[in-house]
Image: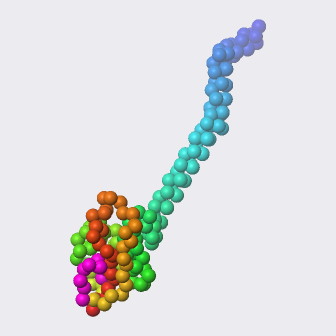
Amino acid sequence: MGEAEISTESEVGSARPDWLHSAVVVAIVVVAFAMNHGLRDGAVRLREAATAQLLSEATHRINLTSPRSGEIALTEPVLHTIELLRANRIESFRLSPAMSGEEFVRQRLIEGAWPIRFEESSSFLIAYLDEYTDCALVDRLDFDPGWRIPRRQAPFFAGRRGVQLVRCP
């Protein structure tokens, strides 16, 4: 009988209720299932989102350092003025007093013309056609009345017929 009592005591000491054992098994199965399906899918979606963000950041950096990357946002007169500089293979330019005084035009030309440098000491000057210069005409651009210009930008080009690229001594 001594042996029976010992085995009974060890069974009593290690005995757990059946519901607790079942709950632990169910919890393990649920966690394993979640890790295998839901969490994995969530991790995949998180990785895809992070990759897309990194690519977006890389694309953004490339756009900041690539010539012509933002030209889609430029108005027709500004875009064609920049093309005038490129067509004449100008390395640097400056703006007439009238163009420099119009911050919107000035900023867009300087940004959009990059890598052509804006330098106050450049011998090449961009001026409106109606501005008098003592310089030699290199090329000119007549504004097309059919160009669509956003209403808020129209005042900058109102009454202007075009631009001239001149070389000053």
Q: Which residues are magenta?
A: 125-134
Quadrant of the snapshot with the C terminus:
bottom left
Q: Relative to residue 17, is residue 116 drawn left or right?
A: left
Among all residues in the image, which is located at the extreme bottom?
169
Q: Relative to residue 78, is residue 26 drawn left or right?
A: right
Q: Could you say which is closer to the camera, residue 41 or residue 2? A: 41
Among all residues in the image, which is located at the extreme front?
145
Q: Position of residue 98 (x, y in %)?
A: 23, 74
Q: State the count of labels.
A: 0
Quadrant of the snapshot with the N terminus:
top right
Q: Could you say which is closer to the camera, residue 61 or residue 27? A: 61
The quarter of the picture where residue 114 lies is: bottom left
The quarter of the picture where residue 155 lies is: bottom left
The verdict on residue 6 being magenta is no
The quarter of the picture where residue 27 lies is: top right
Residue 116 visible, this angle: no
Q: Residue at x 37, y 69 (%)?
A: 145
Q: Residue at x 22, y 77 (%)?
A: 97
Q: Could you say which is closer to the camera, residue 35 or residue 136? A: 136
Q: Residue at x 45, y 70 (%)?
A: 68
Q: With respect to residue 112, does 43 lie above or below? A: above
Residue 151 visible, this angle: yes
The verdict on residue 130 being magenta is yes
The colour style of the image is rainbow
Q: Position of residue 119 (x, y in %)?
A: 30, 80
Magenta: predominant secondary structure element?
A: loop
Q: Could you say which is closer to the camera, residue 98 or residue 22? A: 98
Q: Residue at x 63, y 21 (%)?
A: 23
Q: Relative to residue 29, is residue 74 drawn left or right?
A: left
Q: Position of residue 38 (x, y in %)?
A: 61, 36
